[in-house]
Image (spheres, rainbow, N blue to C red):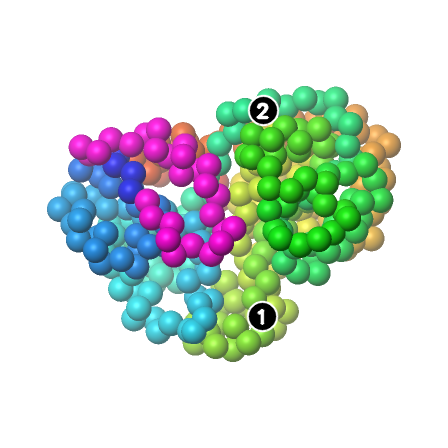
Amino acid sequence: MHIVFDFSHETPGGLVQYINESLLEFDDPSSDHVLMNGLACARSKEIQERYKDRKRKSLLALWSPCEFLESPALPLTTIFDWYAYFDDVYCVCPFTVKYMNSLYDEDKFKYIPYPFTNYSCSPDWNKEYTSSWFGGVHGSDHMHGINEITKHKYKFLTKQQFNSPVVTHFDVSTEQKFREINECKSSLSFNLLYPSSSLLEQNSHFVRDNKGAFSHAQDMIAPQFKVRTHEIASVGALILCKKDPWNLIEDFYNEGAEYVSFSTFEELRELLKDISANWDNYVSIAKAGYSKSQFYTIEKMINYIENNDESLITWSLANVR
């Protein structure tokens, strides 16, 4: 499989760069199957023309459902045109998969977990810190969650440019990120987008038509599974995931057995107290989450994509079919 990438159209900070570095380890330029990564590959006719004679052309659409939240708003014909070139589109949003397949009247779009790698850090189960957050701050959920973890021994890693005394690590490497989170008993996960009301209004035709992804637009949220959820599990930290109307995490992990959820920040507060005092009661869940995360690595996704074999699927397709 030949790996082609172009990230010139990505939102700054939105790209998980190490994933592409791992993909390139599987690159075979002579292959008749090309796997494209990056929004520019969907938009650029020049890139597509270059590989038009390959027998199979695939795309990683790790941004979905963001294509329906552009500013200024795009017509459906434009989005339809982006994807028409490809034989298959591997997408991390089940609602986008279902919506787009209904428009194409074929199973062009296929649901996958957000693939990850962690080559640098194996779990150490004797952890010193209670919890962590790594990522930006994009909504009140994030702010409330950070407020709760700072009441304990915590870590807050970010690349976002803002001054805050609660940030403990800024702009660290992927390898250091894994090492830091490995020292934490738990870490927060919010699998949501937080579009503004004006952005939702601009794209009201998609909000109306793609009912799965935008069924709670009135709350200014949309579903988007985050790769950090797998990353948390991959270092043996306990996934602390806030429940939401879609709960995409349930496509990949079993609640209570492989991760722990909370509905309110009062619940999170009590959870953190208990994790801090009684970590031994949660280690088995963290270990099960770690084992499950190994089903969602780059290697597993490449094997599935390359062989186009549904028997290799280890995640739920309940929201797709």
Indicate left or right for 149 with 71 as reference: right
Residue at the location (25% across, 36% down)? 2
Measuring from the top left, give residue 92's x and y in whole percent.
Answer: 45, 49
Please tell me which residue is depicted at 66% across the width and 60% down the height of the picture: 139
Q: Nearer the viewer, residue 244 or 148?
A: 148
Classify 304 as above or below 120: below
> Please, is residue 52 above or below residue 184 in the view?
below
Q: How crowded is mark 1: few (under 14 residues within 10 Å), some or many (20 or more)?
A: few
Q: Which residue is most to the left?
A: 53
Residue 121 disc label: 2
Quadrant for the N terminus in the image:
top left
Extent of the magenta region: 5-31
Asked if residue 147 shows in the view, the reply is: yes
Mark 2: few, some, or many residues within 10 Å (few <14, many ≥20)? some
Contact flag, marks 1 and 2 (Cβ < 8 Å): no
Residue 280 image offset from top left, x and y in percent: 79, 26
Label drawn at residue 196: 1
Say whether residue 6 is magenta. yes
